């Protein structure tokens, strides 16, 4: 291929810039022209491109967010929107596209590949919910951010003998809640993959730990469980007598400097994606498994199911008293 493009789509994730940097520099070093697509599939439809070179990605490896920006694109979900994107690629001589994002972004990459524009997806999402992949770009940074924020909340929680009910991100996946709950010593962890009963899994656990002379508590809930954390805090205070407060961490979890793990994995994945396109291989998703980088057919990747590690969940349950 002589010309490729790179875009970021869906929710931003720390490490996306490192992946963009790796794509651009790998392409340039191999004599391939590379365009950065501004605001995801919107930019691909409208021809909002920036020609990139080695220096255009200097000093971005340490930055959160995405220098290419990101946006949802309802038009791309239509047949006419996809045709416009294909025409735009053809007009600009773009022969392949690297798509950095989550499963929704990969569906777009699949649709483009089916229409003659080879695409390679790189998993960039803080939720770590891409089934073919043990690890997605942004997850480690987000997990560490949550840990730091909960540790700060704990200082006040402990000082006032309170219970803090904290909502973290994870619409369909509980990886952030589970692992941050373990890292922060949460009394109870509520995730969408495991059925729970508030009376049994929160109230009774708190009362049990109270009998062991514990006076402050952390309850972590993934947003995907659909609980109003403020109402839950009020219920806890009423039933246990422990003053309770609710905190929604929100978008503070998304930003910040990416960790070394996210920078390294993003760089490896970006390099790998370009090497696939150099072989005229598209319709693939780059994946990380057991510290190795490999690739899957997009159709296969989208049909895979990822489940929570119940052994890890049981460990969290046993050590949280």
Image (spheres, rainbow, N blue to C red):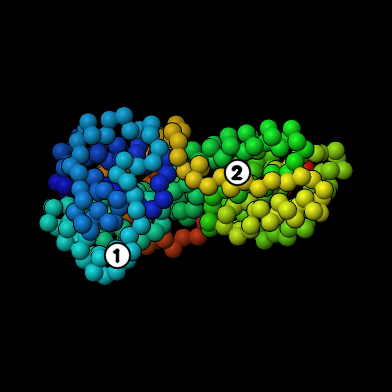
> Residue 85's spot in the image, x, y percent?
22, 60
Say which of marks 1 and 2 sits in front: 1
**Residue 181, placed above or below residue 46:** above
Q: Residues within 10 Å of mark 1 (few under 14, many from 20)?
A: some
Which of disc 2 and disc 1 is earlier in sequence?
1
According to the picture, the residue beneath numbered tag 2 turns out to be 179
Q: Give the total of numbered labels.
A: 2
Q: Provide residue 292's location: percent of width, then percent of height.
A: 42, 41
> Which residue is located at x 63 percent, y 58 percent?
227
Horizontally, is 167 left or right of 204 in the view?
A: left
Q: Is residue 186 above or below residue 304?
A: above
Instruction: Find numbered disc 2 in the image and state the secondary structure of the residue it sits on.
Output: helix
Quarter placement of the C terminus = top right
Q: Furthest residue to the bottom?
A: 79
Residue 52 visible in the displayed image: yes
Percent coordinates x, y for residue 157 in the rendering: 71, 37
Q: Residue furthest right?
A: 211
What's the residue at 32%, 46% (across, down)? 69
Label 1 – label 2 distance at C-alpha: 37 Å
Q: Residue 159, relative to residue 109: is it above or below?
A: above
Q: Is residue 186 left or right of residue 32?
A: right
Determine the residue positioned at 14% across, 46% down.
2
Toward which corner of the image does residue 35 lie, by quadrant?
A: top left
Residue 74 figure quarter: bottom left
User: With 92 as the anchor, is 156 left or right in this view?
Assistant: right
Q: Which residue is mark 1?
A: 75
Mark 2 neighbour density, 10 Å: few (under 14) some (14–19) many (20 or more): some
């Amino acid at each position: 291929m002589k010309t490729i493009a790179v875009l970021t789509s869906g929710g931003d994730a720390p490490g996306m810039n490192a992946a963009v940097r790796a794509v651009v520099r790998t392409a340039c070093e191999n004599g391939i022209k590379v365009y950065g697509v501004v605001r995801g599939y919107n930019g691909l439809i409208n021809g909002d491109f920036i020609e990139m070179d080695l220096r255009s990605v200097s000093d971005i490896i340490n930055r959160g967010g995405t220098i290419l920006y990101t946006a949802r694109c309802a038009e791309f979900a239509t047949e006419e929107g996809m045709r416009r994107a294909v025409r735009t690629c053809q007009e600009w001589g773009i022969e392949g596209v690297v798509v950095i994002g989550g499963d929704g972004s990969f569906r777009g990459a699949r649709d483009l590949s089916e229409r003659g524009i080879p695409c390679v997806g790189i998993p960039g999402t803080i939720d770590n919910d891409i089934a073919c992949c043990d690890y997605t770009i942004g997850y480690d940074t987000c997990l560490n951010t949550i840990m730091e924020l909960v540790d700060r909340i704990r200082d006040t929680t402990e000082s006032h003998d309170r219970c803090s009910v904290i909502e973290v991100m994870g619409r369909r996946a509980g990886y952030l809640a589970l692992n941050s709950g373990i890292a922060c010593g949460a009394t109870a962890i509520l995730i969408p993959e495991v059925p729970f009963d508030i009376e049994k899994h929160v109230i009774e656990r708190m009362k049990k730990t109270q009998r062991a002379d514990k006076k402050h508590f952390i309850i972590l809930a993934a947003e995907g469980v659909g609980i109003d954390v403020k109402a839950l805090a009020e219920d806890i205070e009423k039933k246990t007598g422990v003053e309770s407060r609710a905190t929604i961490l929100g978008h503070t979890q998304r930003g910040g400097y990416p960790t070394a793990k996210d920078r390294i994995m993003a760089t490896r994945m970006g390099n790998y994606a370009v090497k696939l396109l150099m072989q005229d291989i598209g319709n693939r998703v780059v994946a990380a498994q057991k510290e190795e980088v490999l690739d899957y057919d997009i159709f296969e990747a989208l049909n895979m199911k990822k489940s929570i590690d119940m052994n890890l969940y049981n460990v969290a349950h046993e050590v949280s008293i």
